[in-house]
Amino acid sequence: MAAAESEQDPSSPSGEFLSFSARDTAQRWLAASDLKQEVYRHLALYVPRILCQGTGGRDSREEQREELGCQLLLLAPLEWFLLGAEPGAGLAHLQQNNRPSALCGHVFKVGEPTYSCRECAADPTCVLCMTCFLGSVHKEHRYRMTTSGGGGFCDCGDTEAWKSSPFCQTHLPDGGEAPEDPVSQLSPDLVARGYSLFSILLKYAVDLLTGDQQDQQDRQDRLPEGLEPPERADTYFCMLFNDEVHTYEQVIYTLQKAVSCSQREAVSFATTVDRDGRKSVRYGDFQFCDQAKSVIVRNTGRQSKPLRVQVMHSSVVAHQSFALKALSWLGGIIQYSDGLRRILCQVGLQKGEGENSTLVDHLMLNDSKMWKGARNVYHQLLMNSLLMDLKFKKIFAIQFAKNYRRLQTDFMEDDHERLVSVTSLSVQLFTVPTMARMLMVDQDLMGTIIRTFVDQLRHRDLQGRFQFDRYTAQQAFRFQRVQNLIGDLKYVLMSPPDQWTDPLRIKFLEGLDAFLDLLRCMQGMDPVVRQVGQHIEMEPEWEAAFTLQMKLSPVISMIQDWCRSDPEVVLVQAYRKVLSMLSQSSGGLPDGEQPLSLVLAGHQVETFRYQVSQERVSIHLPLCRLLAGLHVLLSRTEVATRFPEQLPLGELAPPLLMELPLRCLVLCAQVHAGMWRRNGFSLINQIYYYHNVKCRVEMFDKDIVMLQAGASMMDPNHFLMIVLSRFELFHVFSSADARKRYRDNKDLVQQNTLIEEMLHLIIMVIGERYVAGIGQVQPLDEVRREIIHQLSIRPMAHSELLKALPENGNKETGLERVIDSVASFKKPGVTGRGLYELRPEWNKHFNLYFHHYSRADQSKAEEAQRKSRRQNGEDTALPPPPPPPLCHLLGSLVNLLQCDVLLALEGAVLQWSVEPGGGSWTESMLQRVLHLVAMALLEEQQQLENRCGEEDVTFSYTCKITRPGEAPSSSGSILALLESLQNAPHLEVHKDMITWILKTVGTIKTIRERTSTSSTFTVSQGAGPEETGRDRDKAERKRKAEMARLRREKIMAQMSEMQKHFINENKDLFQQSLEEMEASTSAAEYSSPSSALTCASKVCVGPRRVGGADLRQLVTCILCQEEQEVRGAGKAMVLAAFVQRSTVLSRNHTCTPEPAGRDPVFMHPDLPVGVHTASCGHIMHATCWQRYFEAVQVKEQRRQQRLRGNTSYDVENGEFLCPLCECLSNTVIPLLPHLATPGHSPDPPSLEAWLQTTSQLIAALHTCRKTPEGELEGAEPVPEGFRLDFSPQPFSSSISEMITTFSLAVFKVGLKVEPDEQDGRVPVVGWSTCAFSIQSIERLLLDEDKPLFGSLPCRQDDCLSSLVRFGSACWTSVPQNTVYTHFSRLLAVLVPDRRVENSPCILNLDMFHLLVYSVLSYSSLHSLDQSGRSSVDVGHLHLLHLVTVAHLVQVLLTCSTGEVCMDQDGGGSEEEQLTLQLYCFLRKHLSSLPDVSPWQLWSRVKAGILPFLRAAALFFHYLNSAAPPADLVAGPGQWESLCSFLSLPPNLLLLYQTHQDLLDPLVLSWIQHPGVPPLLRGGIQHPGVAPLLPGGRVTRFPRESNRLIELPEDYSVLINQASSFTCPRSGGDKSRAPTLCLVCGAMLCSQSYCCQTEVDGEDVGACTAHTFTCGAGVGLFLRVRESQVLFVAGKTKGCFYPPPYLDDYGETDQGLKRGNPLHLCPDRYRKMERLWRQHGIPEVIGHAQEANQTLVAIDWQHL
Ligand SMILES: [Zn+2]
Ligand SMILES: [Zn+2]
Ligand SMILES: [Zn+2]
Ligand SMILES: [Zn+2]
Ligand SMILES: [Zn+2]
Ligand SMILES: [Zn+2]
Ligand SMILES: [Zn+2]
């Protein structure tokens, strides 16, 4: 059935393309009397034919045909009709005459960067697109950069969005005002045609998209009148719609079952459904589709609501698709002309009959019924039309506001995310201040939003308060969605009006009424009762209430801002309203609660019985707190200073005002004191958030304010007595014998904490004056004080400080405006981040009892402050800083300090402190009392100093504390108590403070005496400064000793931790002590040969070399601590090592994974994939290591049984962590003894003789075979002294075993195959890791300008030396004839051998690999020489010479450049002439070589061959344990010493010249290889471009160093690049997680279904898949949208790494949350590059995973 559709029938559109004329059709329409009928007829005929979208799986040709048909047959006539001309010309004409409005209006794509100016934007929602931003002045300002979530548009040109500079260069109005009515610019004909066409099309689209045909099956197929297709076929679609309930997996699984499609198709369906909101999954007759529908419904309906599926007639679907195309077309057309745009707006908002009759209303009100794709299209159209036309934007806004409640209610019922709901347009309308005001006045917008919000939260308790406990999931979902309304409210209130009008006042106050109703529902919600006896059974839900509070906090603050801007009317009215609401809601408070009379210190007060610890108490008191906020604002007004009696203060008695906040504060104190333990974590969390920066402004802070307000209106003694009573401490201070309290009190500790908390509260009530309105301060003073106290804890990064400060509605904290005045900035290094440090001059503002400190903060800050003061030689007492003066309204607060009740409290605590110990008092308690005393003294001193004239100072604290204590504490005066405490030995810590107090008392006395004669008291001065100085020293010494002890303990703990896991497994192995363990961290026991030898010869290769065999190597096993000498016949010692494949040296990142049967004998000069070996340098016995590794395996098995998931190492692949340093390892390298220095034979064979013997030998080996008797015989003669059957066994079995172990490990990793001892490639891969590791280290040393020798860390030195010695011995563990074969093949490259076929050409060879392989394999051949005539070194030297000459030729062949500079007469040096000679020889046979001057040739040869010589020097140095010459150790090696070390002449050409007769034929054979000419042609055709690709292009020397890709300096450039990146797999979709490969620069679509691929049978994400082609399994990526670097190694391992981008404060922004501009930090990027080039990525991942084992596992492979 489906197949029938795809057959071409004669009526298919393609046939009609030719005969159809859009022009004629348009003409016909023009002539028609009923245009609508004509157009509909046309659509009815063509739409179903053209747009018959199948079910996917269509090829792109079909799609193109559809697209083309749509354009030619449907849209073109519309354009012809509208424009009355050829569309192209007509549109150009329109655009030319357009006078566009100055708005940019660029609609943002998902992930596109947006910019907001923090200085000029009206609010944070005002943003610019990148183009506009770069052309604006704001790029010089403080700006914020974010990525768009999609939707929304550029505000450039909107004068209301910007406080200044609203235009970028492009959108700057060009003087000429945009015309008032743009329609008047168009010809009347065009206007008429526009009206009629737009009405028809818009109506058509609206009808099709909003028609309620979806409700009933029988109606769903009905098309609007006039659109029925001529013939109605039985063709249907089974349409699947998306929802937010079912997961991708569920949908994919169901689809596979229901429409029997492949996994791949199902994924594609699911992706489209998710993106567009619907997708047809089956096409055919009705029954066929209906059947699929029932399967889907049945399959998904079991657990939840079934997936929405609908069978729809094909003509309906076709018309719906065209409706969307028509809307997009309209959106496109109006871009050309503001006149047409306005016509469309008029059509859209034309009223019909009744309310909501416009087409736009229809769309809006049906929004939630449409599928996602349709919504997106029409939202886009709204943005392009109505929102771009200022006049109609307003009309639209009114309609939107009118329908607000209904739209929001629809949205609540809908389950789509908000982004695709029409309600999300509110941000475009409400953030325009004039618009918001207008809507507020005309449409009561504020009240509407709030009431809609309240209506949605229906769960209430008996008192009408919100009830969030026992919320169901569905209610939680609703709650989540309804929060968007608060966002809208925020937009409306964002900026307070500059000008109030009476209507605005009325509407605002009405809105406030609604808001107060909302707050009343919150007042007292979620009350708690202290649980005694039993722990609560279920943690109550608390988060919803706090979420609500948190979301409303900015609104509450904004409402206060609005009130403040009209203090005379609105503020006073609002205050009254809140007050009356509060007295209504707490009217019943004292009722039923019995009055209680309290008497203390001669004062009496009435209060009611209430105990927080026994009755209900709530943290949520928004009404009280709003009142507190308004009270502060009143206090700032002039009225408050001059006529406070006119303020509406008297309605509630002060004790009632402060009652609820006080209860809440007492609750916190009791929780701290541990009285509420049985109420569980829910309460602890609530208390935490109450104080947290996100909530405290409208919670904790306001409660303190309310207490301050209450206290200022009361007798201070009464206030304190009520506080005492609420803290349930009254009896403690009122009873005649306070000592009784600790005789039989079980809860003494609790009570002590309560007393501390209460004293702290009193300190805060009197001392916290940094709110404008409480104290006489500026708003910035508050921020500054906040910062000072944060920085007093420790230096902090910018983001840390920001987090500690509350944000205002504009997301600003004010930090930047004051930070530089109080702190100095310290730049970050290559790691870490920039830090702000408090300038010392601000230390004096430090207040130990700062109200926002937690107890932990407080003690940290105290310690830091004392330390800093000690360092500066200052007094370490921390007296309170001088407070700012109080505002008039709260002036009486200071009297608290000297009231009788407080004095009684102070006296009591001081009295208790006389007795050391006993638990009756605490240090904190005393410290707080001393602080209070000091505050009182400061107050008195300030008053004395500031008084004018003879005015009497009413504050006489010094006088009062000299009075002897009254009952109940019948003791001495406070002053006397202080004096006696000063020298009490148990109060050493407080001595400084007491001394300070007594000194201040003295000062005050002096001031008073100077001016009056009244006071007569004596003060005994405290101890002299010397004494305190001495004590300080003593204390300091003690502290240092303690620190040292702690440090020692920590180190010991670390050490033991390191080894614990191993010790646990192998208890018996450990007899040695920890100290010895520490001493053996490296193989430091043997002295390195490089330093031991000072022999003058300094030659590393050839018969003249000096070896290191006479050095005894003593090493210690890190596991058993036994010492052991490295000997060939001894017990094997091994080095932990990590082997990995590497593409780090390759310039080509597109190689496909090579086949498993690869022949590794020849390495391409691009070094496509190498095998790298590294080691941490830790040595073990082979047997100890084996036992350890077995233990690791067992442990891993046990772990896997317990829980799933990956460890940081993969035991199955042989991975383990080094038992000492936890370095990731996957094998061990055996340690082998040094080679012996050769005995000097008098006459080493010449090159010629050697070559001859060697060829003879190879020939003999080639032909020989074993006779049945086991004898060897061959056809060729064997050279004299050679024994073909000799097979030496120089190593003990344990060492041989380890050689095999390591060989196989390298083999397995290097070739990605299963280990196979019989495979002839085993030794080759072993040699290759020697060569590759040396090459990569040589490269690093060269690039970092480090000397070749002596600069390597010890562990690398050890690694390379054991690696090379292993390489020289690995032939002993494999069948010898495989090694002979390798050698003969290698030699045949240089010396032609007719027996060897398919030798590669020298241009396709890396000469260093060739050298290493041939030298290492030669040992095997040479071992047959029993003649003793020549040493193996002779062979090495000849091989080196041969390879060097070959490399010379290779360099000369490839050194040509485009610039040819002939300089024949230069004469030049001997080197140049000889080079030219060889080059001419080459040119004679290869005519394609260009002319190059001899000077150029020689310099290129020298540069090109240098890396080879350096690598060779390293190789022979390690192979032969030869000491390097001093200048190669000390500095960058000089050419001459390098050559002489390698036993080469400095003029390398002499190598060729001296053996020219022998070499010329060889050279000829090299360049006549058939592979040479094509390679050279490829290379020469592209001069300047480095030829990289193996097979086809040629590699030049020296090879360029590999680098990570260049990154742009400005991060937003990357974001912009990524935002236009589309997923390569799903047809032009935006990628969700665009990710950049830092190695090759490829952009990938990561972390997404669409781009998963299979690698070795496992699904992996795009990044992991990419690493296998780009980095041999290792990859570095930048996740652009997250600003995060991703390291990946293998299929399961990865980690995140800080990106190399920093903001101006020296911090990274992982997740792009803060939005500060980010710039590239080249140092950090280089550091990362070095890490990569050093092959350190797997190691970093290992450490990161080891450190984060407890975190939720990330599925690295799917990234
Ligand atoms: Zn723009
Ligand atoms: Zn602009
Ligand atoms: Zn600006
Ligand atoms: Zn051991
Ligand atoms: Zn180690
Ligand atoms: Zn993708
Ligand atoms: Zn790549």
Image: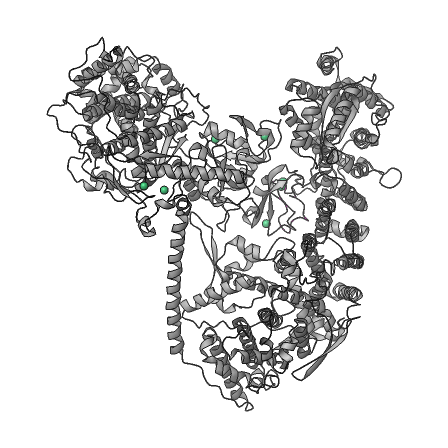
> Which residue occupies 45% across, 75% down?
988
Q: Quadrant of residue 1446?
A: top left
Residue 469 place in picture, x, y as percent: 72, 53
Relative to 841, 551 lies left or right: right
Q: Main secondary structure of the magenta part?
A: loop
**1247 or 641, which lies in front?**
1247
Up the image or down, 825 lies above or below 975; here it is: above
Q: Is residue 162 magenta?
A: yes
Relative to 1517, 999 lies left or right: right
Q: Quadrant of residue 892?
A: bottom right
Question: Magenta part of the protein: which range?
Answer: 154-172
Residue 528 place in picture, x, y as percent: 70, 60
Outermost residue toward the front? 1068
Residue 1276 place in picture, x, y as percent: 21, 9
Residue 1596 place in picture, x, y as percent: 35, 25
**1265 or 857, which lies in front?**
1265
> Which residue occupies 39% across, 57% down?
1049
**185 or 533, which lies in front?**
533
Relative to 326, 782 lies left or right: left
Where ligand 4 lies, by quadrant? top left
Outermost residue toward the right? 353
**Coloration mode:** one colour
Q: Quadrant of the N terminus?
A: top right
**1274 or 216, which lies in front?**
1274
Q: Quadrant of the C terminus?
A: top right
Residue 1473 can be seen in this image: no
Q: Quadrant of residue 375?
A: top right
